[in-house]
Amino acid sequence: MIVPTAREILATIEHTLATVVMPDAGSTAARSALATTGHLLRHVQLRIELEGQLLLDDIAALRPLLADLQAWLEERDEGIAGISAALDKVWRAQGAYPTLSSLADEAGALRHALTDALERMIALRDGNRDDPAYLALRERVRSYLAAQIQSEVAIIDPAFEGKGARR
């Protein structure tokens, strides 16, 4: 293990800014900038701790949802090449460590494919309002989006809530 950890380094920077630099910050703008920097450092610390698992969970939720959306669309000759491309792409070499960048790229592409699928489903809404499969897929998309927003709260709220004003 590399010591200190990245998280420990960020905590030290945050502490130094709050206890050494902030007391000598003369202007409101300087104090505000330091407070904002503290918020962002806490946010990065939480991301180091949580973001990898959040992205893995997001990918695990998106893959089956997108596969089902693509199957439904293909049954109607409305398949979207971008969904298949995102699902079929090899994002990392076999056995390679999943870096945050590679996970973020994969999750981003899958989310983009979800946006494309949702736009197509909305365009097909009039002819499928009573289709139970259509309604179930729309509900799954809504549930995914709600869960995704809640998961992001885990890396945002603790860094900023109760820590003073933000700019």
Image (spheres, grey):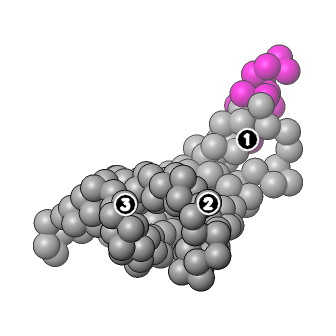
Residue 44 spot, x, y in % from top left: 55, 51
* Residue under label 2: 126
Q: What stretch of residues is rendered in magenta?
A: 17-33
Residue 149 quadrant: bottom right
In the shown orientation, is residue 44 left or right of residue 139?
Answer: left
Q: Secondary structure at mark 2?
A: helix
For badge 2, the amino acid type reads Asp
Residue 6 appears in view: no
* Residue under label 1: 18
Q: Secondary structure at mark 1?
A: helix
Alpha carbon of mark 3 to alpha carbon of mark 2: how far?
15 Å
Residue drawn at (33%, 64%) of the image: 77
Give neighbour class at mark 2: few <14, some 14-19, many 20+ (Cα, 10 Å): few
In the shown orientation, is residue 157 left or right of residue 1?
Answer: right
Residue drawn at (57%, 56%) of the image: 122
Residue drawn at (40%, 56%) of the image: 113
**Which one is closest to the eye, mark 3 or mark 2?**
2
Depth order, front residue of 20/94: 94
**Which one is closest to the eye, mark 1 or mark 2?**
2
Residue 151 quadrant: bottom right
Residue 119 spot, x, y in % from top left: 52, 52
Give neighbour class at mark 1: few <14, some 14-19, many 20+ (Cα, 10 Å): some
Residue 68, magenta (yes or no): no
Question: Which quarter of the figure is the C terminus placed in?
Answer: top right
Label located before the other in sequence (3 or 2): 3
Q: Secondary structure at mark 3?
A: loop
